[in-house]
Amino acid sequence: MNTGERKLIVVVAATSQGLIASDGQIPWHLRDDLRHFSRLTRGNTVVMGRKTFESLPSGPLPARRNLIVSRRGFQAEGTEVFASPADAVAAARGNVFIIGGKALYDWALPLADELWLTLVKGYATPPSASDIIVEGLQETNVFNANSWTLLSKETFAADERNDHAFDILHFKRQ
């Protein structure tokens, strides 16, 4: 998707099974990952689905252009709404960060120039009908794919800031 200076970048936290949410919520708290996400996306355009937007505790993410994808007549102050991910990306300037949910990840992963994957370790619960799984993010799909090159890996331990150990992995499309 790289068109000159503009990149399509997926940013996601998931388990090795591709779990990104359960019961409509992110089931872990990783303060160091949130800090990384903020530094990475600040000053850029973020694209998210309506449900992802509605899950944010304080509305639009500050210091970012917030583009929402919704097929309904959704509106929210401080955002721009588009009927499709392609329309949202076309309206963006500079790098575009896809930040969820599942439908947007499914759409963006085959097109993305980069992937920032926070791989959450040690999160295990019995599977639930409310689990949201992105098959393209399952560890076997990411690490066995010939289309990604690992650029960097940063490891974090579980501690008072992070309720699980995790790695932040940065991939580039080959």
Image: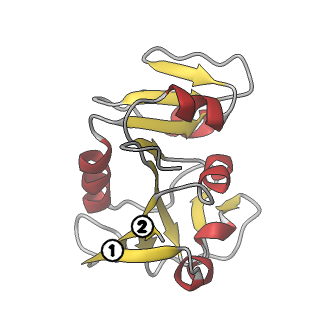
x, y (%) of residue 155? 27, 78
**In the picture, residue 106 is in which quadrant?**
bottom right
* Residue 172 circle label: 2
Q: Which of 37 and 126 is in front in this view?
A: 37
19 is higher (above) or lower (below) than 48:
below
Residue at x 25%, y 61% (from the top left corner): 32
x, y (%) of residue 123? 49, 76
Q: Which of 102 and 153 is in front in this view?
A: 153
x, y (%) of residue 3? 47, 44
Residue at x 22%, y 68% (from the top left corner): 160
Amino acid carrying mark 1 in the image: Leu
98 is higher (above) or lower (below) than 17:
above
Q: How crowded is mark 1: few (under 14 residues within 10 Å), some or many (20 or more)?
A: few
> Does any portion of residue 166 appear in the rendered image?
no
Apparent side of residue 145 relative to residue 32 in the rendered image (left or right): right
Residue at x 59%, y 59% (from the top left corner): 109
Q: Nearer the viewer, residue 142 or 21?
A: 142
Badge 1 marks a residue whose secondary structure is strand
User: By what rule are the colours in the image chosen?
Assistant: secondary structure
Badge 2 marks a residue whose secondary structure is strand
Task: Write down the residue under mark 1.
Answer: 151
Which mark sits nearer the N-terminus, 2 or 1?
Answer: 1
Q: Which residue lies furthest to the right in this view?
A: 129
